[in-house]
Image (cartoon, rainbow, N blue to C red):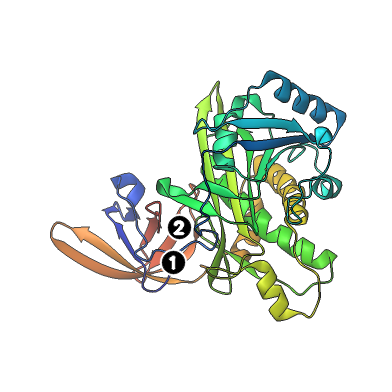
Amino acid sequence: MVSSSSTFFFTSALGFLSVRNSLKKAIFLRRTSSAISAASGMDCNSTCTLVLRGKSPAESKIAEGLKNSNALKLSDNSELSILLDSELKKPFNEDDAFGIDSFMNSLSTDRFGRLLLWSPRLPSTQDVVSQNFCELPNGAVCVADVQYKGRGRSKNVWESPKGCLLFSFTLQMEDGRIVPLIQYVVSLAITEAIKDVCDRNGLPYIDVRIKWPNDLYLNGLKVGGILCTSTYKSTKFNVSAGIGLNIDNEKPTTCLNAILRELSATTYQFRREEILAAFFNKFEKFYDLFINQGFQSLEELYYKTWLHSGQRIIVQEKNDDQVVENVVTVQGLTSAGYLLAIGDDNQMCELHPDGNR
């Protein structure tokens, strides 16, 4: 988390302190633990089942084609069994399995989330969409009940137990300059989706906040994270957006339902299907604003949701063997999506993460 004890390294250039220009990275010195990482003890050698479902006849036809072609693969070469949702004679016998019908009935998008790939257990939803990106339509989503090789930044691996919403989806973008900002749109859509679910069900406000650049915090504890990766192919950027949100697992930190129980006597519990559908309903609107009007159209709402406005940070500047400390105040984001801060001497600086902190 960016805090008063956080430290950044930068070099000055023509009065603008920019790590980007000097090819140096600003680093947070405090590392956080993940609220969705825990030992699952999963055997990664058994067969994984992937169930396909389309919202309309058009997406159902795509699902059928994917099954018949047997084109979908897992990156670790695990055996994969592919089924259509209509082929299931009965639902998976676990009460906490993802509710496909509930998700589809709550989804009101034109593009995103309309082709669903669901599995009770996968190595990583992010690897599924990345590995099979060219086989999947734009907006296809992969959901897993459990992950045993979930991906984080800097090649971190997360083992994700039951009780978490774990999903990744496909997205194609043409303007490489704005690709780094898409993680902020995703983060904002998640927090706003949770608000929508609360409003719709008459629940107290669950104050999930964004910790720049890609974490989700609740009451000072991490409850989720976002990972967006991209490759460039045929004049377009193929973006795989992955999200993990701790809904119903109180360890090792907290979860949405634990906080809800503290705030209200309601018997209602957040469900993964409802939050996922609310996310896509919100994300599609935000994404259209983002593409047509730029991130400026979402900036005010983003700043209301993140943790860092006016935050004071200690910055260390390396100059040969000397280290000079300065205190800066976070102002917002730069056009490239990094932290913009101003020093007490009115010098501006651009601060970068190192991939973990």
> Crowding near pointer 2: few (<14 within 10 Å), some, many (20+)?
many
Mark 1 vs mark 2: give the one in front: 1
Is residue 38 at least partly visible in the picture?
yes
Sequence-first tag of 1 and 2: 1
Kind of residue at disc 2: Leu
Does residue 186 appear to the left or right of 104 in the view shown?
Answer: left
Where residue 102 appears, x then y in whole percent? 83, 50
> Crowding near pointer 1: few (<14 within 10 Å), some, many (20+)?
many
Is residue 177 at least partly visible in the picture?
no
- Mark 2 element type: strand
Asked if labels 2 and 1 touch by Cβ distance under 8 angstroms, the answer is: yes
Task: Using the rendered view, name the quadrant where residue 137 is placed.
Answer: top right
Front residue of 239 and 325: 239
Q: CA distance from mark 1 to mark 2?
A: 10 Å
Task: Using the rendered view, name the quadrant where residue 199 is placed.
Answer: bottom right
* Residue carrying label 1: 2
Tell me which residue sits at (66%, 64%) in the image: 248
Where residue 174 appears, x then y in whole percent? 59, 30
In the image as oriented, which residue stretches furthest toward the left?
Answer: 321
- Mark 1 element type: loop
* Residue carrying label 2: 339
Task: Using the rendered view, name the quadrant where residue 261 is placed.
Answer: bottom right
Front residue of 266 and 314: 266
For residue 148, above or below residue 263: above
Number of numbered tags placed on the structure image = 2
Where residue 315 appears, x then y in whole percent? 32, 66
Does residue 269 appear to the left or right of 6 in the view shown?
Answer: right
Front residue of 8 and 164: 164
Tell me which residue sits at (34%, 56%) in the image: 26
For residue 319, above or below residue 67: below
Kind of residue at disc 1: Val
